[in-house]
Amino acid sequence: MSKNLVIVESPAKAKTIQKYLGKDFEVKSSFGHIRDLPKKGMGIDLATFSPDYEVSADKKKLVTELKSAVKKAEMVWLASDEDREGEAIAWHLAEELKLKPENRKRIVFHEITKNAILKAIEHPRDIDQNLVNAQQARRVLDRIVGFEMSPVLWKKVKPGLSAGRVQSVAVRLVVEREKEIRSFVPKASFKLDGIFLNDANQEISAKLKKDFNKESEAENFLESAKNTEFKVLNVETKPGSRSASAPFTTSTLQQEASSRLGYNVTNTMRLAQRLYEEGYITYMRTDSVNLSQEAIDGAKKQIVSEYGAEYSSPRNYTTKSSSAQEAHEAIRPTDFSVKAIGDAQLSKLYQLIYRRTLASQMANAKIEKTVIEIGNAKLPQHFEAQGEVIIFDGFLKAYGIVKTEDEDEENNEKLLPKVTVGEILSYKKITATEKFTKPNARYTEAGLVRKLEELGIGRPSTYAPTIQTIQNREYVDKREIEPQTREVVKFSLVKEVIKKEVLDEKFGGDKNKFVPTDIGEVVNDFLTDNFTEILDFGFTAKVEESFDEIANGGQKWKEMMTDFYSKFHPRIEDVEENADRANGERLLGVDPKTGKNVNARIGRFGPMIQIGEQDDEEKPVFASLLSGQNIATITLEEALELFKLPFNLNEVDGHPVTIGVGRFGPYVKWGETYISIPKGEDPLSVDQSRAEEIINEKKLADAPIANYKGEPITKGSGRFGPFIKYKSVFINVPKRYNFDNLSQSDINELVEAKLEKEANRYIQQWEAEKISIENARWGPIVKHGKNIYKIPKKKDDTKYESDDLKEVSLDEVKKWITAQDPKAFAEKKKPAAKKPAAKKATTAKKTVAKNQQQRNNYSE
């Protein structure tokens, strides 16, 4: 057995590091945290803020293995990541494995290279308790906020909701941007563009230096320009330069990977993690733009070799953020001689990092800007043409140029022909187009990261999980926003003739940008109304600063928690006691048929329309909103249209056909089969012909593609990707198979592998009782319905083996279940009989209510 045991976070990292260490070292992985706050309950003593950490069930076997390895080693090296989370992992390992200070060493490294690992071994330290405490403070504070705020949401808004400190602020940003867009009133103006020709018939595109607010002003200018002789009034040429951006931090990598590669934040971090673990880049969670001297020298050598000495300009960058840890490095390649790697996705991100780092050490690009003024003394305004020429490409040789989402669509980076002052030009075409001002754009993932960083909210390790969480909780999504249409006026002056056109312009459409859901808006409004301080951007940034102070040893974490909780908890109690319920209710108007109020609000199954009130003699009727509709903007007319659903069409193949909308969106119900109507299609537009098309598509999709032992095999695509179905068994189809062209041998192989796996799954099974003893990933378990129970030890304190479990009786298994859940077999109470209605509803109302119930029961 090796004298030295090295514990890292991930198996990929373990594999890489093992290559660099000799036979005296054994490298094992902890697979992240081995213990944490319990999943059930708060797990924090609120009197002392002491966390009650526990080893999760899926890590117990691993911890036993690590304890065994520790006993055989003389020294344990804790080599988790260099950030606060990594420090906490090392501390948890030391505590749980009972490592004595003299038998443990903490090592950190910015990159997984042989030199870095050997250097870390030569310069070990002990666990930094300040970094651990900063992580504990974040974990405990966020648990308390979520644990105490979420039940208030259950009581005041809707069961099952949750709140979080950083996540709720991120949702607030998205909601406030959406409200800005809704309240934005566009202003129209006329922008004039001209195309002019010189004697050599070369085109010069120019813009009038002033916009006109009125249509008449634009038309009058064109009238005055009709017979005007245009001249070059001025030519100005001045040198300029462009400098490279700093090397990547976590935030800037996420933003640039989004704009250049189209990667979302989660995918970027997943790929960066792999690049780091496989030794290609330095640590990818950093807010520093600092480079080591070794990296600067390595980049210089590569630049001189590849581009020439004139392209080299070594420099270091200073991070603007006061909280950044300058001891860390920016994200950079570990070896500048490696330009690309085998895996295509990994290589794209690697090359982006490679080029950005190289560019940061290269000379500025030299450009020449040219501005040409075109006009006539008789005209009130003149045109201006702008262009630029790159004289020396510098860093652009490695990195190129990319526009950000905030830059103007117009591109002035064009080459202009040579002209002289006084030169006569003719106009080819002058246009005056009505343009409308635009609201601030909705946030992309990269834009939201940039805003969070700008406000000082969150840190490098939090951006990706925050953005993933607010989507998982369905507070925001990236649904496509259909554009609206408006009329715009355009004048064109060609050959002394002015032509007026009225054109249709699409506006307001969006895709792949964050939009708040109805429940996201309701939750945000409730929290901002009742927890102003927690949702305040400045407060959230101040909390992050407190964590930084704890990490630097300037503040004690439990004192910080005491101060926070003394103000936070009384607010929770006050809101729980006194705040009004919130469901986003909005009165749309009155139903002309019944004279009853029509309201939009959040209901049990999401956003809906309600006609009538709960205390009316006749029960209110309901309709679910369609995809793309929301409570804040739906009109009375649109709401009333929803009550035309569901409606019946003619039978198809002897089965009734109904068009409706349910929890999972619009559907065609054919007999007992529900078929989703394609996304974006209005269910009210589905007629008999379209319904039959949808039904036939479903028939085709459900048709058997093959047989196995006389039983049909069908295929489909679900939550977990493509699958085939044999009897009642769903079998996932891995990517190595051609799903569109599965052969009979492929199907045989897939079915037999699944059946073999299922056969090995059950040790014993009692189907009638819905109880089974099964083999699971970490050993045998007991299942009752959907619940999982542990298998206790035998009377002699040894574990049950599979052969033992084959002999265990059902009664004994029931005792195991009852010991862990006394109510597991308790009889469920029958629902109380419904009281008769005070007055019979009309047949029409009954039908609507019944149809709504069908919609609510709809499931895919």
Image (tube, rainbow, N blue to C red):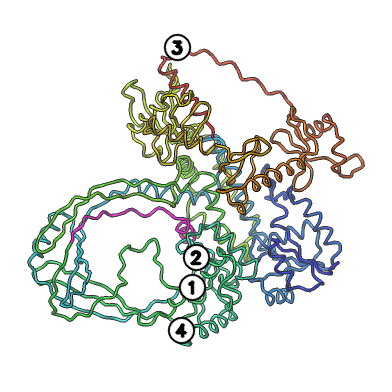
Q: Nearer the viewer, mark 3 or mark 4?
A: 4
Magenta stretch: residue 445 in it? yes
- Name which of mark 1 and mark 4 comes first in the sequence: 1
Q: Nearer the viewer, mark 2 or mark 4?
A: 4
Disc 4: CA contacts within 10 A as few (<14), some (14-19) or many (>=20): many
- Name which of mark 1 and mark 3 comes first in the sequence: 1
Identify the residue under disc 1: 246
Q: Nearer the viewer, mark 1 or mark 4?
A: 4
Which stretch appears magenta? Answer: 431-453
Identify the residue under disc 4: 311
Disc 1: CA contacts within 10 A as few (<14), some (14-19) or many (>=20): many
Q: Amino acid at mark 2?
A: Thr
**Residue at position x 72%, y 65% from top?**
14
Q: Position of residue 394 (x, y in %)?
A: 42, 80
Residue extending furthest bottom? Answer: 309
Q: Amino acid at mark 1?
A: Ala
Q: Position of residue 95 (x, y in %)?
A: 77, 58
| Left or right: 302 in relation to 98 | left
Identify the residue under disc 3: 839
Give the alpha-carbon distance from disc 3 to disc 4, as whole Å.
87 Å
Q: Position of residue 669 (x, y in %)?
A: 48, 29
Q: Amino acid at mark 4?
A: Tyr
- Name which of mark 3 and mark 4 comes first in the sequence: 4
Q: Position of residue 50 (x, y in %)?
A: 70, 51
Circles 3 and 2, Cβ within 8 Å, touching? The answer is no
**Residue at position x 61%, y 71% from top?**
280
- Name which of mark 3 and mark 2 comes first in the sequence: 2
Q: Is residue 103 above or below residue 563?
A: below
Residue 252: which disc?
2
Circles 1 and 3, Cβ within 8 Å, touching? The answer is no
